[in-house]
Amino acid sequence: MILEIQHFSGFTVLLLMRILTLATISLSLIWATSCMGLARPDCDSPPAASIEADVREIAASYSDWGGPVDFQLRFGPVDCFMPPVQPRFSESDSSGPHAEKLYLVHAYDATSYAGVDYSSERQGGMVFAEPDPEDPQRLFREVALPELSREWQQILVKEAFVPTLAGEELTTELAGQPSYVASAERGESSWLPGESAGLFLMLRTARDTPGTDEGWVYATVHPDGAIGEVGEISSCANCHRRAGEDRMFGLPGIAHDPFVSD
C-alpha cells in the first residue's frame, strides 16, 4: 500500500513538472513574440529620426490614397494646435472661428477607421476606388505606401485649413481634393478651406511598444513642409487619452469601431 502511494505521488509530481514545463515554454513564447520581450523589430521604441522620415514620406503621398474618409469639412477643436517653428503671437481672436481649423481626415485603413464602404457615393475614397476583380460590383482601395521604417497598423492624416467665409476670395485651392467638398456650417454661415494650416498625423504600431501612447505616435507638419514635433507628444497624448483605449475620437456621423486588436 505504501509503495502504491509512493508510486502515485511520484507520477503526480512528474505530471505537474511536465505541466509547469509546458506553461513555462508557452509563457516564454508569448514573451518572445510580444513587445515586452522586444523580440520583434517593430516593437523597438521608434527613433525620432525614423518617425520624421516616415512622416515626410506620408505627407508626400497621402493625397494619393483615394480621398479623405468623407468629404465633409469640420471645425477642429481649439486645443488641437500646431506648435510653431518659431514662437509667435496669434493674430486671431482666440474666441472666434479663425482660432480653429477646418479639417479633412485621410486614413490608410479607412475601413477599420470608420467602416468606409467604397460602393457608397456618400463616403470618401470612392473617387479612386477600383472594381474588385472577383466581384465587379464591389469597389475596393489598395493603398500603396512608400517604403517606411516599419509596418504601421494604421496611419491617420488630418489635413487642416484656415476657415474662410464662403463668398470671400480663397487664398489657395483645395489641392488634390474634389470640388464638391461640403462646406462647414455654423449658424447661417458657410465656411470653406483657405490657406493650409498643416498636417496632424497619428501612426499606430503594437500597443506595448516603448516610447508610444498605447502604440500611437503623433507628428505635425507645418504648411511649408517643415516637420514639427514627433513621437509621444504630450499635448496630443493628453487629449487623445480621453478617447479611451484606441485613442481615436472618430468623426461625427460616421460609425467608429475601436482599432485596438493587440
Image (tube, rainbow, N blue to C red):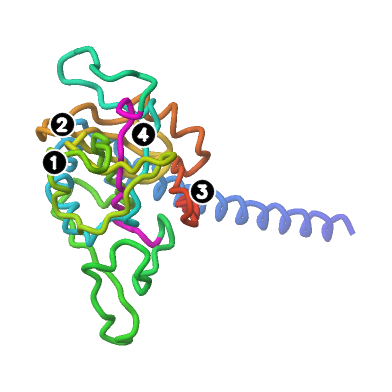
The mark lying in front, picked from 3 and 4, is 4
Q: Is residue 81 magenta?
A: no
Q: Which residues are magenta?
A: 97-111
Q: Amino acid at mark 2?
A: Ile
- Secondary structure of the residue carrying numbered label 2: strand
- Secondary structure of the residue carrying numbered label 4: loop
Q: Are marks 1 and 3 in contact (CB under 8 Å)?
A: no
**Mark before the other along the chain sequence, 2 or 3:** 3
Viewer-nearest residue: 204 or 119: 119
Question: How far separated are the C-alphas under marks 2 and 3?
Answer: 41 Å
Q: Are marks 2 and 1 in contact (CB under 8 Å)?
A: yes
- Residue named by callout 3: 27
**Mark before the other along the chain sequence, 1 or 4:** 1
- Secondary structure of the residue carrying numbered label 3: helix
Which percent across, then down, holds residue 39? 33, 45
Question: How far separated are the C-alphas under marks 2 and 1?
Answer: 7 Å
- Secondary structure of the residue carrying numbered label 1: helix
In the drawing, what numbered circle is on residue 227? 2
* Quarter of the rendering occupied by the N terminus: bottom right
Question: How far separated are the C-alphas under marks 1 and 3?
Answer: 39 Å
- Residue named by callout 4: 212
Which percent across, then down, holds residue 190? 33, 43
- Residue named by callout 1: 56
Question: How far separated are the C-alphas under marks 1 and 4?
Answer: 19 Å
Q: Which residue is depicted at the point 26% across and 39% down?
A: 160
Q: Residues within 10 Å of mark 4 (few under 14, many from 20)?
A: many
